[in-house]
Image: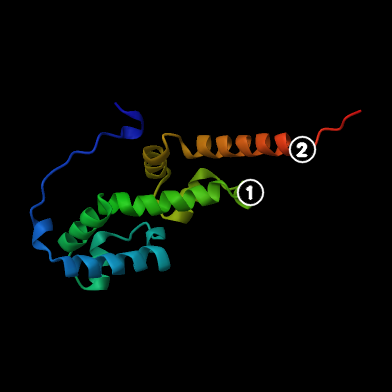
Amino acid sequence: MAKYNIHPKKEKAANYRMAVSTDVINVIYEQLLRKMIVEKKYRDPHYTATRLAEEIGTNTRYISAAVSLRFQQTYTELVNGYRVREAVAILTGRRYRGLTMAEVASSVGFANRQSFYASFYRNYAKTPKEFQDNFFAKSLELRRSRKPHNEE
């Protein structure tokens, strides 16, 4: 079994994607970006495509079509991508060093630590802790190499 139960993505045809007009896709795309970037709805672990569709007055098939056509991924992959990117910002911030991985996962919208680790690993091929440790080790190495050497 693959690490963190990650399997290759299977492509399947969805004919409804082509039935949705470009104008509708563009409107959904703009509203989706506003919900994710401005309102940061991805932080809510219960924010589903169904809730998004209700809020913007469309249906989940149209949401799925817009995400697939504009982002070339599923809705879940898109939302988890935003979560993982915010987690990276937290993991590399010195003031957040004391947070546990469960606290980081929760703060960015993952319902549990396992889904956080799986999504993170899928994006970075490292666990969040490995990523953080590697980042700070490189940071320390860089600071040490910049220190002026005393010649005595």
Q: Is residue 26 shown above or below 110?
A: below
Identify the image quadrant of residue 45. Answer: bottom left
Residue 77: x percent and y percent? 30, 49
Tag shown at residue 73: none
Residue under pointer 1: 94
Between 147 and 121, the one nearer to me in the picture: 147
Query: What amino acid does circle 2 point to?
Result: Lys
Farthest residue to the right: give it: 152
Residue 2: x percent and y percent? 31, 28
Residue 2 seen in render: yes
Residue 84: x percent and y percent? 43, 48
Identify the image quadrant of residue 41. Answer: bottom left
The secondary element bearing badge 1 is classed as helix
Q: Is residue 29 shown above or below 141?
A: below
Query: What amino acid does circle 1 point to?
Result: Arg
Farthest residue to the front: give it: 151
Crowding near pointer 1: few (<14 within 10 Å), some, many (20+)? few
Identify the image quadrant of residue 137. Answer: top right
Look at 41% across and 68% down and name the residue there: 38
Between 70 and 124, the one nearer to me in the picture: 70
Look at 77% across and 38% down and name the residue there: 147
Tell me: 39 left or right of 152: left
Residue under pointer 2: 147
